[in-house]
Amino acid sequence: MKSIIDRAKAAYLGVAIGDALGATVEFMIPNEIKSAYGVHKEIIGGGWLKLKAGRVTDDTEMSLALGEALLSKGAMDAHTVATSFLDWMRSKPVDIGGTVRRGLVRFSLTGETVAEPSERSAGNGAAMRNLPVIIATLGDNQRLMEWTSIQGRITHNNEESDRGSYIIGLLTSLSILMGGEAPLHATARRLMEETPAFDYTRFKPIDTDGYIVHTVRTVLHSFFSTGDFEACIVKTVNYGGDADTNGAIAGMLAGAFYGVESIPGRWLRRLDPNVKEAVERQVDILLETFPPRRAPDPDGAATCPRPFWPLP
Ligand code: MN
Ligand code: MN
């Protein structure tokens, strides 16, 4: 169990570190990053949001809000999660995505916990905040899929968003449970066969616009072409574009897979100490409240029911 707790913490710290590192170069293109930083690999803040070094953005903050909602109910409850997101929005966050804002405004006006279906809501905003669901459903892929969609659809009512969030979720879940033994290549291959749009071998460096399909390709391309936590995140954020969110998701997967010892000390020291404490504490309570109940199930990728796909 200790190794599971450690890897879950590493995944959450990975979200925060990828977010804080990537935010500096969000919306830049690779050539701009190169002329400004060479290779961008230090947490220095700045960026279009003019952040203090170590400060995180909506990606990490919404994750914490989702985790708090799961803990306050001891279960997944869409209304509780939506309320927690809305409270966060009202706290005047440093950044908030358009689709997220639309969904939460609608919830505040109507109480509806499922956003309007929209072609345009295939952004990565549901996947970026999903780690608490992944931690609370370890070993139960069916529940992972259901809870992923419930929290996601509060703002992103879109099959591609559900599917991309689930792909990242399943790979992260297996990594937290199995560490370096997790059969990620085989599982990823099977997931890509089911939904070829997400095939990361089709990654192009220009596809960093925050579209969930592009985000999954970018993260998996970076993850499978590097051999440690630092290299995976550095590679991801240096593509620019939605660098904080891509970085957060890459950090989630790489943290889960490589573990807490793999995280560079200089990044941990730079991260906002309140955030570091909050994510570590939340992992402890999440795993107490929702203990992993079954053995890892890598085959779940192929066998789980599919109410939301195949995609066209
Ligand atoms: Mn962000
Ligand atoms: Mn972003």
Image (cartoon, rainbow, N blue to C red):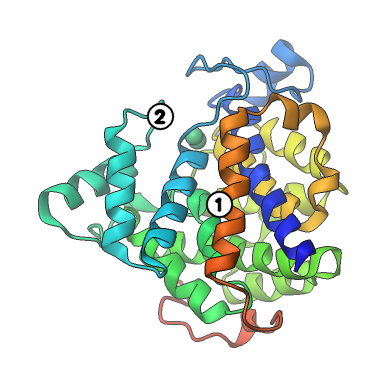
The residue to which callout 1 is attached is: 282
Residue 2 image point, x, y percent: 77, 63
Mark 1 / mark 2, whichever is N-terminal:
2
Residue 264 is drawn in which quadrant? Answer: top right
The answer to whether one can see residue 312 in this image is no
- The disc labelled 2 sits on which kind of residue? Asp
Task: Choose between 302 and 254: the one closer to the eye.
Answer: 254
What amino acid type is highlighted by mark number 1? Answer: Gln
Locate residue 13 relative to residue 245 in the image: left or right.
right
Q: Residue at x 63, y 47 (%)?
A: 280
Residue sitting nearer the eye, 155 or 53 = 53
**Can you tell which mark lies on residue 95?**
2
Q: Secondary structure at mark 1?
A: helix
Distance between mark 1 and mark 2 Cα atoms: 22 Å
Residue at 45% across, 76% down: 309
Is 67 above or below relative to 270?
Answer: below
> Within 10 angstroms of label 2, few (less than 14), some, or many (20 or more) residues?
few
Q: Which quarter of the image is occupied by the C terminus?
A: bottom left
- Residue at position x 61%, y 39% in the image: 277
Report if the beta carbon of the residue with label 2 is closer than 8 angstroms to ligand 1.
yes
Quick check: can you spot residue 5?
A: yes
Spot occupied by residue 79 in the image (x, y as percentages of width and height): 26, 61
Which labelled disc corresponds to residue 190? none
| Nearer-the-camera pick, 227 or 34 | 227
Above or below residue 59? Residue 292 is below
Per the image, label 2 sits on a secondary structure element best described as loop
Looking at the rendering, which quadrant does residue 93 occupy?
top left
